[in-house]
Image (cartoon, rainbow, N blue to C red):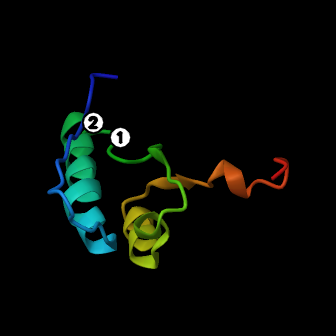
């Protein structure tokens, strides 16, 4: 790892929806990874999301799939874990 890829500040009181999450968080991260790793790009990239509304929105899932990013399921959904 070469350190942080993205630090994004949010205005106090701003609501983060799926569009803001894609445009201001995911796209800049994906673009930076593509610049840093031109040969492998986003292939083999994995992302772990919790079940926050912006994270589980279909548009987010579709965007990550289109960029060939693997989404790791939230471990709290695992049948192996007791509630």
Locate residue 83, reporting x and y percent.
Answer: 81, 53
Q: Quadrant of residue 57?
A: bottom left
Q: Residue 37 — which label?
A: 2
Q: CA distance from mark 1 to mark 2?
A: 6 Å
Quarter of the rendering occupied by the N terminus? top left
Are the residues flagged by discs 1 and 2 in contact, CB closer than 8 Å?
A: yes
Identify the residue at horizontal 53%, vertical 54% (top origin).
50
Viewer-proximal residue among 57 and 30: 57
Instruction: Give the vertical position of 35 relative to 67 (above or below).
Output: above
User: For the residue labelled by badge 2, is the local secondary structure a helix, a strand or a loop?
Assistant: loop
Count of number-bearing discs: 2
- Extreme top residue here? 2
The residue under the point 17% across, 48% down is 9
Kindly identify the residue that appears in the image at 32 percent across and 45 percent down.
41
What residue would you read off at disc 1? 40
- Density class for disc 2 (Cα within 10 Å; few <14, some 14-19, many ≥20) is few
Q: Nearer the viewer, residue 83 or 30?
A: 83
Where 78 sits versus 21, above or below? above
The picture places residue 63, in percent across and down from the top left corner, at 37, 68
Instruction: Classify 10 Å Cα crowding around label 1: few (below 14), some (14-19), many (20 and above).
Output: few
Residue 71 x %, y %: 53, 55
Which residue appears farthest toward the bottom when viewing the image?
58
Rendered residue at 17%/57% (across/down): 12
Taking the image as shown, residue 6 lies to the left or right of residue 50, namely left
Is residue 68 left or right of 29 when viewed as pictured?
right
Q: Give the SS element for disc 1.
A: loop
């Amino acid at each position: 790892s070469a350190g942080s890829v993205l630090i994004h500040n949010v205005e106090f009181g701003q609501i983060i929806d799926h569009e803001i999450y894609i445009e201001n968080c995911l796209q800049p991260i994906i673009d930076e990874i593509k610049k840093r790793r031109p040969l492998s790009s986003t292939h083999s990239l994995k992302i772990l999301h919790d079940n926050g509304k912006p994270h589980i929105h279909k548009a987010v899932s579709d965007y990550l799939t289109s960029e060939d990013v693997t989404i790791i399921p939230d471990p709290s959904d695992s049948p192996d874990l007791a509630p």
